[in-house]
Amino acid sequence: MTDVWCSLLLLGFFCIFTDLSFCYRGTDPGIHNVIHHHTNTQLESRQEDSMAAQKQGLSGGNDSPEEAQQHIAALILARGGSKGIRLKNIKRLAGIHLIGWVLRAAIDSGEFNSVWVSTDHDEIEKVAKSWGAKVHRRSQEVSKDSSTSLETIQEFLKKNTACNIQVVCNIQATSPCLHPTHLKEALKKIKKDGYDSVFSVVRKYQFRWKEVKKGSDECTQPENLNPAKRPRRQDWNGELIENGSFYFATRDLIVKEGRLQGGRVAYFEMEPQHSVDIDVNSDWPLAEQRVLTYGYFGRRVSLMFCEVSGCLTKRRVQDRPRESPPYCLRPRQPSAKGSVHSRDTERSSVSIHSRDREGLRKLQKDNVEVVLLTSEEDVLSSLRQKLKLKTMRKCEVMLVGKDPLKDVQSMVEKRKLDWKDVAYMGCDTTSISCLEKAGLSVAPADAPRKVIQAAKLLCESRSGAGAVWDFAKHVRLQMKQDGTDHNCF
């Protein structure tokens, strides 16, 4: 009898053990909460997901792939009521709108899902759109003299929730020497290293002293040096100072904590030559010299369209009488200003400046294909072949109609080029559509106002007096810039 009870007891223990083992394998969902090992496995998995999300700059690990894809936006604040310099943000610096320098760097970096300009001014909005940026029309509440950048960025995020923006890069419009590589390297600190905010700095070697109020008997004191052991520059690392060029920050930091710098903070050090700021008129000529040497001039163009009348020459289509006889080329005679003059039977002069001819030769030397555009109504229409054979040699001459875009579009497609790789130099209002599409659009200094507004680059020289040469200089500056930027595209 005892043996029977022992057998029954052992059988009971076996059944209990089997049930526990069965539950342990997870067939009963309710048992998960009491199984220690499985709970630890879940926690470890969540921690790994959380670390991965933090490293990628995301806020959670349960989103779908579409939701988890972070949207990174560049935002340039450009209020119309600049106090130091009126409409400073769209004033031309070295022929380019001031805001155009940073917009070009942001767009060419290829790091942003969207590039925005926050403004309250119609003209700034037009310029921003011409450079390919989206526009946020800021409210009057954040357009006051007392409004802060943080308030404006917060409003931008509040009104653009559909974009699901997770990271914002606030770029200062008055930093014309910003390069795409600066933005790419700084953003790596957020995307790969898991920082919450990154801002630009520059190293300064300046000794600071305590300010003393006027009329005070107090003596000033050094703040970052010992006068008894004054270091040499080469023996001192200097100090890192914010240069205001850009500020990266996560959405949560801006919206929830109300700041641009916080959480895990990092800096990106820029070279002194790239740290340029413009506040007052006296800063302008210095900034122009700096940007011509250290600025980012954009991606190189491989094809250039240049209108003959109004760009290469002073003559315009509307200057030619309908009944004028065929154009007759006379022997070239250099003028006092270096132009080559030709005259028709009505003694109306057309000049081709020697500097412009040299500019075209340099463009060709730099492997830029140049296509000269003429029309049937052009005073030079009968001179097309002579221009090709005698004056411009290797330049192709193309006849265009009343809508130049239709004609040049076919050539762009034939060359399998993107319009970003194309430059267009025009002086007629019929060319505005071409100027708006071209990656680099150029207008002579004496072009009509609407044409100048559509052009990204405004030449210093007038038509027929060196405007083409000015453009050639701009292209050569593109070639001299840092080679690493050429690989951004």
Image (tube, grey):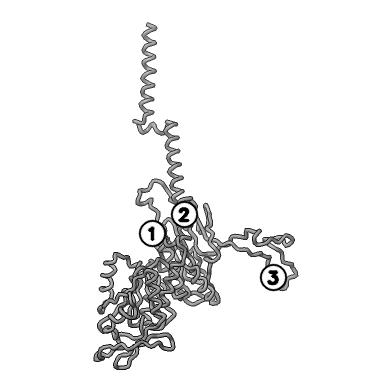
Q: Amino acid at mark 2?
A: Lys
Q: Amino acid at mark 3?
A: Lys
In the picture, the quarter occupied by the N terminus is: top left
The residues tagged by marks 3 and 1 sit, at their Cα atoms, a distance apart of 49 Å
Comes first in the chain, label 2 or label 3: 2
Residue under the image location 72 percent in, 60 percent down: 229
Q: In the rendered view, does 294 fall on the left or right side of 3?
A: right
The residue mark sitting in front, 2 or 3, is 2
Residue 248 in the image: x percent, y percent?
48, 58
Q: Is residue 440 something that shows in the picture?
A: yes
Q: Which residue is mark 2?
A: 188
The residue mark sitting in front, 3 or 1, is 1
**Residue that sits furthest to the bottom in the current view:** 346
SS under mark 3:
loop
Residue under the image location 55 percent in, 61 percent down: 201
Residue 408 in the image: x percent, y percent?
28, 72
**Mark seen at residue 402:** none
SS under mark 1:
loop
The residues tagged by marks 1 and 2 sit, at their Cα atoms, a distance apart of 15 Å
Residue 242, picture quadrant: bottom right
Q: Which residue is mark 3?
A: 213
Comes first in the chain, label 3 or label 1: 1
Comes first in the chain, label 1 or label 2: 1
**Mark seen at residue 113:** 1
Q: Is residue 141 something that shows in the picture?
A: no
In the picture, the quarter occupied by the C terminus is: bottom left
Q: In the rendered view, does 360 fall on the left or right side of 200?
A: left
SS under mark 2:
helix
Residue 49, picture quadrant: top left
Residue 366 in the image: x percent, y percent?
39, 69
